[in-house]
Image (cartoon, grey):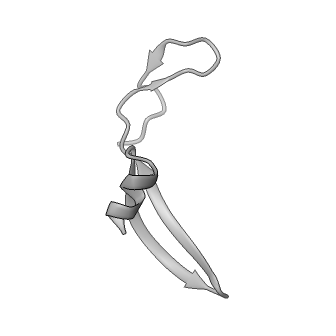
Amino acid sequence: MDKFMKQLASNLDFISYEINGGKCYITVASNLKEVTCPFCGPPSTIGILN
């Protein structure tokens, strides 16, 4: 499943999945250490959970 998620988005790590009521719920986590603010542009590590 992790390989499948990496093909969709390389910055996501697979955590778990659950099938409930005919729907599949996939839990992922970002592996980014730094992100760029979409509003003002500079990189930031504030708010990144480790």
The image shows residue 1, relative to residue 29, as above or below, that is below
* Quadrant containing the N terminus in the rendered view: bottom left
* Quadrant containing the C terminus in the rendered view: top left
For the point 51% across and 79% down, which residue is it?
A: 18
Q: Is residue 10 left or right of residue 26?
A: left
Furthest toward the front, the residue is 7
For the point 37% across and 46% down, which residue is it?
A: 10
Q: Is residue 9 left or right of residue 3?
A: right
Where is residue 43? Give x, y as percent.
Answer: 45, 17
Furthest toward the bottom, the residue is 21
Where is residue 33? Give x, y as percent.
Answer: 35, 32
The image shows residue 25, relative to residue 34, as above or below, that is below
What is the number of callouts on the image?
0
The image shows residue 19, relative to residue 10, as above or below, that is below
For the point 65% across and 17% down, which residue is it?
A: 39
- Among the 4 quarters of the image, the one containing residue 20: bottom right
Where is residue 29? Give x, y as percent.
Answer: 43, 52
- Among the 4 quarters of the image, the one containing residue 2: bottom left
